[in-house]
Amino acid sequence: MMNHSAQPSRTRPETAPNGLWIGLDVGGTKINAVAAGEDGQVHARARIPTDASSGAAAVESIAQAVRSVLAAAGAGEGAVRAIGLGIPGQVQGGEVRMAVHLKLESFQLAGWLSDQFSVPVTLENDVRAVALGAYEWLIERCQRENQPAPGSMVYLSIGTGISAGVVLNGRLHRGVSGMAGEVGHAVIDPHGVVCKCGMRGCLETFVAGWGIARQAGEMLAAAQHSGQPTLLAQAAPLTAERVYACAAQGDPLALALAEQVGRYASRAIDNLFVSYDVDCLVVGGGVACAGEVFFAPVRAELERMADESPLARAMVGPPGKVILLPPGADPVERGVLALARQGS
Ligand SMILES: [Zn+2]
């Protein structure tokens, strides 16, 4: 797999005079890889499908992703300085557990990959890795605006699932078992519907992509029963993205659902502030990508809470404490490269 133009490590290629940091975002269907130089400049990107037919095939795909991005950069294996990767699952001491989409129940992935390429490897849970990237983006934004850099931040990812990553004193706070910030399964309504985790009324059942689709289905059935017209009727199969597209077109039912999601999401945000007392909270993830139509009801509810309660006013009230991640912030790429730099 070595590129023919690749040189031995002592005479590294011109594209990577000081070695390359490799960042990998590992998913159940694809792996995104990026190679960057010491100055942070990206030299190459590569995307390969994940072979998740077995755990062994999945880890081989991960090594293949490193080779692919090196080939794209015109560099050999000797140019790699360190590797950082984010992976769905519980991560502790370089070991990944319960990565069901990759059929990895328990595997020392950092050690294995480190042996393959003879470089340091830093492994982190995918949302925790993105949290690190969101924090880097925040620091950069503060520098640009001549604002003091925040020392602490929570990144709340609202997408297919819900999870948070916590940065305290400029460092990722992992918790005893690497699970700090797993708020998707915080119970909001003990009498609610059964969640994927087996409990009832978790935050995910209301605010995750599948939870929003579920509620939209219920609302659509009720509307059809009562003869109420709604754009949701043409949006099958219902997804969070389609619900927000209908809301953006002014559909009353989709707007009502967006408001309901905003109420639950804002409570989760307030809970994270009272739990971690951070400088700010950044919201991102697939559902949050809907932008203002998603975020306006969240902001409205936070303002209402701040009006009602002095505690909420102190926690979520000050302007700029809750930030929607803008398009182009690239927290995934920033995060995995930050992990690589940490290890080198
Ligand atoms: Zn749950």
Image (cartoon, rainbow, N blue to C red):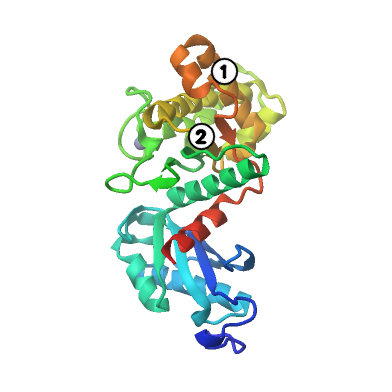
- Distance of label 1 from label 2 (alpha carbons): 15 Å
Write the residue at 32% across / 48% down: 178
As drawn, the label of residue 24 is: none
Write the residue at 48% across / 65% down: 50
Q: Quadrant of residue 197?
A: top left
The x, y position of residue 127, in whole percent, is 45, 48
Query: Does residue 25 appear to the left or right of 110 in the view shown?
Result: right
- The answer to which of 69 and 21 lies nearer the viewer is 21
Q: Quadrant of residue 321?
A: top right
> Badge 1: few (under 14), some or many (20 or more) residues near its Cα, within 10 Å?
some
Write the residue at 40% across / 36% down: 184
- The answer to which of 87 and 190 lies nearer the viewer is 87
- The answer to which of 128 and 290 lies nearer the viewer is 128
- The answer to which of 168 and 85 lies nearer the viewer is 168
> Badge 2: few (under 14), some or many (20 or more) residues near its Cα, within 10 Å?
many
Write the residue at 53% across / 78% down: 79
Position of residue 156 relative to residue 96, above or below, is: above
- Name which of mark 1 and mark 2 comes first in the sequence: 2
**Residue 225 visible (yes or no):** no
The x, y position of residue 129, in whole percent, is 46, 52
Q: For the residue marked with disc 1, what is the amino acid?
A: Glu
Residue at which label 2 appears: 281
The x, y position of residue 280, in whole percent, is 51, 33
Position of residue 143 relative to residue 14, above or below, is: above
Residue at which label 1 appears: 303
Query: Does residue 112 appear to the left or right of 141 in the view shown?
Result: left
Query: Does residue 199 appear to the left or right of 294 in the view shown?
Result: left
